[in-house]
Amino acid sequence: MVFENRCNRHGTGPAKLTTGATRPIEPKHLTAPKRKANLVQTMLSDHDFYILLEHLNRPWAGFRRVRKGVKKRIRRHMAELGCSTIEQYLAQISRPEAKTACEQCLSVTISRFFRDRQLWQVLQDRILPDLAQFASPSLRIWSAGCACGEEAYSLAMVLSALTLPSRPALVATDAQQACLERAREGIYNRSSLKELPVMMQARYFDIKRKGRQVLIQKHLLPPIRWQLHDLIGDPVAANPFHLIMLRNNLLTYYRGSALKNAFSKILSQLAAGGCLVVGRHERLPGADYALVRDEGCPWVYWLKKQWPSPVHTGKIF
């Protein structure tokens, strides 16, 4: 019995079971390289992917829409380990190094500049000026799970458009070194700029490779400290942050005690009166947190108290 290769519309798991199907039998005469290539070309079924997610206590709903690319990476890792079945793979990832590699395969780095433009206008008009007014000695911001840096550079562009009393400290972290290296390099596909007006594109980016890619002009922006850090691990810094961007990562791709423990650690890094920003489709992992939802933007939460909001009229779009 195998799962049909489509998903439940409610996002709770693969749709249903069908009968009469069997696993393809791999020819015994294949050499090792050909056998590995054959395994890579065979798409991991939704059934097996669901079993893997359950084994790792990860939510099917979070991976449902992005599962195609993730399944390809998992199948490639299975081939590297010589696994032809999900049962063999589960046995292999009981080893710490194999599990770490598996977790990296589950990482989703899809992003773009100024994702959810409404949020960025609220940040520029109200939240960042308010935080800067009360932050001492300077505004501290954390882009948690920054992927390849689009969010961190978007923050830097907003900050460069504001008049702040002191230079802000902007920290961007991710669990994958390759993502941080790409962020430092600052080269992106032009499609990632689709939320930016043409004027901002011209100011902050140089066109490369016949228009297919762009290079960000880092010298025009506040500096960013890139740091390797796993959101499931220890706190990232000793000093608290006034703004934490926790969008489209931890709250989407984790669940259960791992999610709650990690979220509590991250929240412990937020200064009193500070601001937490989550993804537009994400929810907090419970109600027992001292967070108050912002009245003007439902993806923004304030810790303990919300400062009065001065009127700001500047626009970045």
Image (cartoon, grey):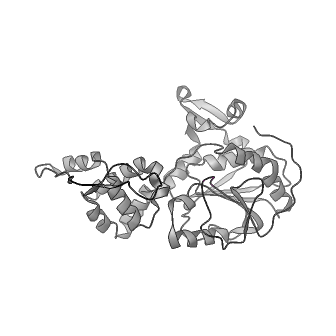
| Occupied quadrant, residue 79 | bottom left
Q: Nearer the viewer, residue 137 or 294?
A: 294
The answer to whether 96 is drawn above or below residue 143 in the figure is below
Q: Residue at x 54, y 58 (%)?
A: 252
Side (left or right) of 240 relative to 138 = left
Q: Nearer the viewer, residue 109 or 310?
A: 310
| Occupied quadrant, residue 167 | bottom right
Within the magenta stretch, is there residue 185?
no
Q: Give how far across and how far down residue 255 sits, in percent.
A: 51, 66
Image quadrant for the N terminus?
A: bottom left
Side (left or right) of 47 relative to 161 = left
Q: Give how far across and how far down residue 290 sits, in percent.
A: 72, 72
Q: Nearer the viewer, residue 220 or 69?
A: 69
Overall secondary structure of the magenta stretch? Answer: loop
The answer to whether 238 is drawn above or below residue 168 in the figure is below
How many numbered marks appear? 0
The region drawn magenta spans 279-283
Side (left or right) of 14 relative to 287 = left
Q: Give how far across and how far down residue 109 sits, in percent.
A: 52, 50
Q: Residue at x 34, y 70 (%)?
A: 94
Q: Residue at x 67, y 52 (%)?
A: 224
The answer to whether 203 is drawn above or below residue 76 in the figure is above
